[in-house]
Structure formats: structure tokens, C-alpha cells
Amino acid sequence: MLYQIYEAQRALMEPFADFAQASAKMYSNPGSLLGQTPFAQRISAGYDLLYRLGKDYEKPVFGLQTVESDGVALAIQERVELNKPFCELRRFKRFSDDPATLTRLKGQPAVLIVAPLSGHYATLLRDTVKTMLKDHKVYITDWKNARLVPLEDGEFHLDDYVNYVQEFIRYIQGIYGNCHVISVCQPTVPVLAAVSLMASRGETTPLSMTMMGGPIDARRSPTAVNNLATNKSHDWFENNVIFRVPPSFPGAGRRVYPGFLQHTGFVAMNPDRHLKSHYDYFKDLLKGDDASTEAHRKFYDEYNAVLDMDADYYLETIKTVFQDFNLVHGTWDVKGVDGQVERVRPQDITTTALLTVEGELDDISGSGQTKAAHELCSGIPPAHQKHLEAQGAGHYGIFSGRRWRDVVYPEVKSFILAHNAVPTRAAAVRAVAKAPAAANSAGVARRRTGTGTKR
């Protein structure tokens, strides 16, 4: 009933939020009678803050219209390339009317950015995408809000996440011959699994993997997030954070980890920081500091917009990544789209370069958790492995903001460029075409050796 109670409370608050917004505008308008009262600015600021605290935050848009590349302004068209029940593969296509610029753009690497499915929308990586567009063809996974996915569209498991990533990689390979993959936070684990499975089958794997701030080995430098997952049982999570979507949504009846509960957890990690931020916003409104108030709005428009996660996916992630540590123990089996179960073997990756990035002050994925990927990927030559620790950067700083643009991105760009030896299109087409056969033969081999088990 908690979800229904929350929705009732939200519906009750909506007219009050609208009233607060209208009142803030009236008191801030010098042309109105209310705007001429002695305390108009202070009253307006108070109503504005009430509106921000009480409003419903919807999914943001990327809103990328143009980007500058080598001094040339490029027009951006955002479009959906593949539409899956729980995810859209989005592309940000760049346009220019300058022939020389077009030639340069065609030769740039194609990159798949795998966004987290851990509460926030993919738009959290807006700065990542905008920066990457200067020098790359960019695709991103845009995960859907589970409460909007009808029950008839089926279940969504961690295995499905891994299979989605493989499908997206093959799709981009079919267009460009090959691609590079960047995973931020949560998807580092399923991305490593996806590429491992492709390598084990003999498929063409991405030219490089860049893994940023993710829990590859969550046992190292455990954070508050890790401790919560390890101190609570699997049954506790299922009984306390999983609810069914109310009838008012397309996904009515689906079991989910609701976004509003996730948001409560986010805020509870640093309540003092958020309280100070809102108080500073109130003071900036009084001072008329438009730049600071707009920065606050942009951050919290993104931060407060959360999505529901499918319960099966969430619970399996908790168990596989944070409780059983199946990836690092070498005991993770993934069920493919053909129904066959295969063992995840990162040591089988040999032709994909690996870059790991960690933030010195990351309080979500602790020091060494992402770097652990290098030990697991023992088949990658040391010359094609690199680790970067961004000094002074927290979790968000490694993919957004000044440290991302000035410190991390130059390293990512250089690493991708150094490993951008794309095979011929004909060779790539042959590799993609033989993928199903390779997958079947690999599954047979594993069943014969006992390394795969059916569920």
C-alpha cells in the first residue's frame, strides 16, 4: 500500500505546488500590487522554494541542439535507433554543411555509452554526452521507467540487461565495423559480462572498454551503499522496498523498486548537504543571483527525477554484485536470448583495450572497486590496460562537470583514439553474421564441459 499512499499524497500536494508557483510569480512581478509590498521578494522566494520542494519531477530531456567541434558548430539530431521494452538506444547524430567537417566527422570513433539503471534517468549523463560529441559518434542506453512498461511486455532480469548490451554493441558494429563502450557506475558489471560472453563465443568485441566508478569488486573500500547491501538479507530487500505499481500507470501490477524510495535513500546519504543547498537557493533568490538559482534548478531537476526499477532486475543485482560477488568469484552464469546459460569469463577478453576511471573522493564506488577489472581481464595485454584516478573528484565528478571535462575526458579521448583500429566493413559484417552460430557452438561446448547450467 505504500506506493498507493505516496501517489495519493503526491496528488494532494499538486494543487498546493501549483499555488506556490503562481504566488511566487505574482510576488516577484513588480507590475502587480503584490509585487509592490515591502516583503514581496522574501515572500516570493519562500513560495518558490515551497514549489521546488513540492512539485513532481518528470523525466528531463537531453536538450542538446548544437555542439562545437574544432571551432565548428554542429547541429544535433536526437533519435531512437532501437526500441526495446525496457530501453531505447538513442543516437545523437551530428550535421554540418561544411564538406571538410563532414569528412572529419565520418572518420571519428563510434561510442556506446551505457548509462546507469540505478534510479536516475540517462539524462544524468548529459554533460558526458555533450563532451563526447565533440570527437565521437555517440549512442546511449536510455532506460525506461518500469512503471510505464505494461506487464504484457514481460519480465526484466539482470540477464536481460546483459543481453541488451550485447545487442546494442552488435547493432553499432554492423554499421561502423566496431565501436568503443563506456560504462558509468552500475553498468560496469553487466558491460564486462556482455563483452566477456562475446569474447568466449569468438565474436568481435569492442575496440575498448572504459569503466568509470563502478562496483566491479564491491568488497574493496566498501561505502555506505555497499554496507547497506551486505548488511541486509535478500529477503529484507524483497519485503521492504519492493511494491506493485498502482492502477493509474501503464505498468500497473508490475513489481518494482519505486523511484520515490530510491530518492529518499539518495537524500538520506547527505541530508545536511541538501538542506544547505536549499537554504543557499533561498538566499540567492533574495539576492537576485540568477546564475546560482538557475544552476540549483538544473541540478535538482535532474537529481529529483527518478524512475522505478523492475524488481527482478534490482534484486538480482543486489545478490549478484553486492552479496555473492559472482563476477569476481567466477561463478556468474547468464541466460542468453536463446535460453542457453553461459559462464561469464572476463579472462577470455583479449582484443578489447581496458581503461578504468575512479574518483579520489568517490563515496558510492570506493577506491579499487573499478580498478579490480584489470585483474579479472588477465587476457588483455598490459600495454592495452590503463587506470586513472581523478584527484579531487567525487562520484559525479568523473563524468560531469569541470573535472570530467578537464581531467577525465582528455584521457578517455586519447585512449579511444589509440585503440581505434577498425576492421574493414566486410570483415565486420562477416563477424556479426556468424555471431549466432558462434553463440550456439559456445553453448554446446559449455554444456559438454559442465560450465553451463540451465535454470
Image: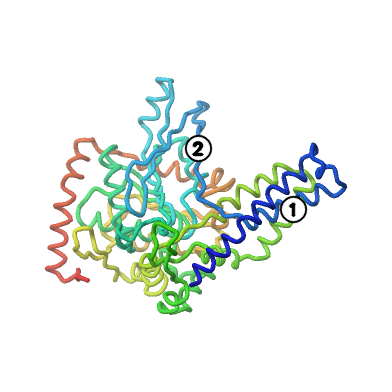
Percent of width and height locating residue 161? 33, 58
Disc 1: which residue: 282
- Count the marks: 2
Instruction: Name which residue lies at 58% across and 47% down.
Output: 401
Percent of width and height locating residue 155? 31, 62
Disc 2: which residue: 64
Residue in the foreground of this view, choosing between 407 and 78: 78
Instruction: Name which residue lies at 26% across and 67% down.
Output: 333
Label 2: which secondary element? loop
Percent of width and height locating residue 57? 56, 53
Percent of width and height locating residue 269? 59, 67
Label 1: which secondary element? helix
Q: CA distance from mark 2 to mark 1?
A: 29 Å
Q: Is residue 425 left or right of residue 290?
A: left
Please tell me in which quadrant of the rendered image residue 331 appears. bottom left
The reply to whether residue 334 is visible in this rendering is yes
Instruction: Name which residue lies at 25% across and 40% down.
Output: 174
Q: Is residue 155 left or right of residue 120?
A: left
The reply to whether residue 386 is visible in this rendering is no
Q: Is residue 203 left or right of residue 313?
A: left
Amino acid under disc 2: Leu
Q: Is residue 350 above or below residue 155?
A: above
Taking the view exactly as shown, the residue that stands out farthest to the right is 38
Crowding around mark 2 (Cα neighbors within 10 Å: few <14, some 14 to 19, many 20+) is: some
Residue in the foreground of this view, choosing between 341 and 380: 341
Amino acid under disc 1: Phe
